[in-house]
Amino acid sequence: MGIKIINDKCVGCQICTKVCPFGAITMVNKKAVIDLDKCTLCSACVDSCKFFAIEFKKDTKKTEYIEQYKGVWVFGEQKKGIIQPVVFELLGKGRELADKLNTKLSCVLLGHNIKSKTQELIYRGADNVYVVDTPETEHFLDDTYTKVFVSLIRKYRPEIILCGATTIGRALMARVAVRIHAGLTADCTHLDIDTKEKILLQTRPAFGGNIMATIVTRNHRPQMSTVRHKVMKERDVDNSRKGEVIEEKFDAQSLSSRTKLLDIVEEVSATINIAEADIIVSGGRGMKGPENFAMLEELAKVLGGAVGSSRAAVDSGWMPYSHQVGQTGKTVCPKIYIACGISGQIQHLVGMQSSKTIIAINQDPHAPIFNVATYGMVGDLFTIVPLLTKKFKESRK
Ligand code: FAD
């Protein structure tokens, strides 16, 4: 894959410089020059050039034996032997994708003394679990996990791999994708199957969240996606499900690592983590100032919830970043999300729209938040929020 300007054909019209979304093209001596560090090979400039002065060669080489890649995999991330909740969410989505493809759903579990956890993965939707149970895989180590995962991919050839967009998942999948020359779509918010082509449709926000892009990987396998925690719904436990546990063995060389884990230091947080809260009362620019967030804290306290915020409130210095919900903040999926004075821009919505019940309080009846709200209250939040707090307090007596 490559792109270059054919100088003899370039007339210096500058259309390509305006079309390039990444500012990667400049004019030098009346000829276009592409900065390859900025260029993402999106090819917008190629289509815009009326003089055919931009040569773009696509890599059409396919993964060898592409038709042999079958099955959907989920990476069974564990920490201290506890399966991370994002895995159950991915098993739910993975089951749906596998059923559409009429194929198997597998979970790959690396850890130590971990075999007892395999049944739970089957109850959550996996048809089989590949388990690597050794002291060397007890904790995540970049190179050991990568070597093991890549070997399993080469052995079993899955067509799709899903992984949580966690710190571990991001580190692992990037390394795996490079080793096996596969594409990787990070931070997907929606996954589906193109029933005609039988390929994965990977949707994620692009261009600062202004559009939702659906990405397909036609020529390479596996098709790899990471998905943030709380974006997809967990699958219910079905204790009647049966599946197979396949234990995989590796030699010392494959399990070796250049790094050694010395210690794991847990982050201590004084406030409720909004990503884990069942009820979130969130405030935006409509709160008008930091002092008014006390009103939301009171409501959250009565309901046993946590306080969230939009980026506008964080950027104004009214709330700490750890409370920000949205594309560049946390993705949350509480039972109840109460949005107070939040307009509902796409970057906020991608972080909370899968909440079970959304209650929006906004004085503007046309605010986009009402498009996703289960219940909407049009009015002044400074009147409505204290009334709600009072009512909930009374109902507790
Ligand atoms: P506004 O859009 O200003 O809305 C304020 C709302 O309050 C209005 O609808 C108004 O009607 C209402 N209001 C005012 N007074 C009252 C009152 N008295 N009673 C009731 N309602 C009232 N945003 C996020 O939230 N999270 C992100 O992670 C995030 N990431 C981003 C990433 C990128 C790359 C970009 C470009 C933007 C991102 N944004 C994010 C910003 C996003 O685009 C919006 O600017 C932001 O969400 C707006 O916050 P808001 O709804 O609080 O403010």
Image (cartoon, helix red, strand yellow):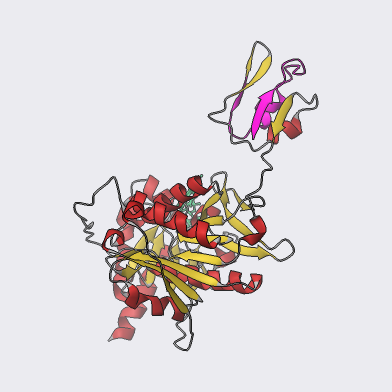
Confirm whether the magenta stretch covers residue 141: no
Q: Which of 260 and 349 is in front in this view?
A: 260
Q: Residue at coordinates 50% horizontally, 70% vertically from top-left?
A: 106
Q: Residue furthest right?
A: 50
Residue name at image x 35 percent, y 53 percent = 144
Q: Quadrant of the C terminus?
A: bottom left
Q: Is residue 286 above or below residue 258?
A: below
* Quadrant in the picture for the N terminus: top right
- Is 262 situated above or below 93? above
Q: Position of residue 170 (x, y in %)?
A: 42, 52
> How many tags in the picture?
0
Whole-percent x and y of residue 108? 44, 66
- In the picture as drawn, the residue positioned furthest to the bottom comes out as 240
For image coordinates 46% across by 54% down, the residue present is 150
Q: In which quarter of the image is residue 67?
A: bottom right
- The image quarter in which residue 190 lies: bottom right
The answer to whether residue 49 shows anywhere in this view is yes
Q: Residue furthest top?
A: 29
Image x and y of residue 30, in percent: 68, 13
241 to 61, vertically: above or below: below
Question: Of 106 and 24, which appears nearest the observer?
Answer: 106
Question: Quick check: 305 left or right of 285?
Answer: left
**Image x and y of residue 391, in percent:** 36, 79
Residue nearer the viewer, 8 or 347: 8
Tell me what residue is drawn at x 45 percent, y 81 percent: 123
Taking the image as shown, residue 231 lies to the left or right of residue 103, namely left
Q: What stretch is highlighted in magenta?
A: 1-26
Q: Nearest the camera: 23 or 162? A: 162
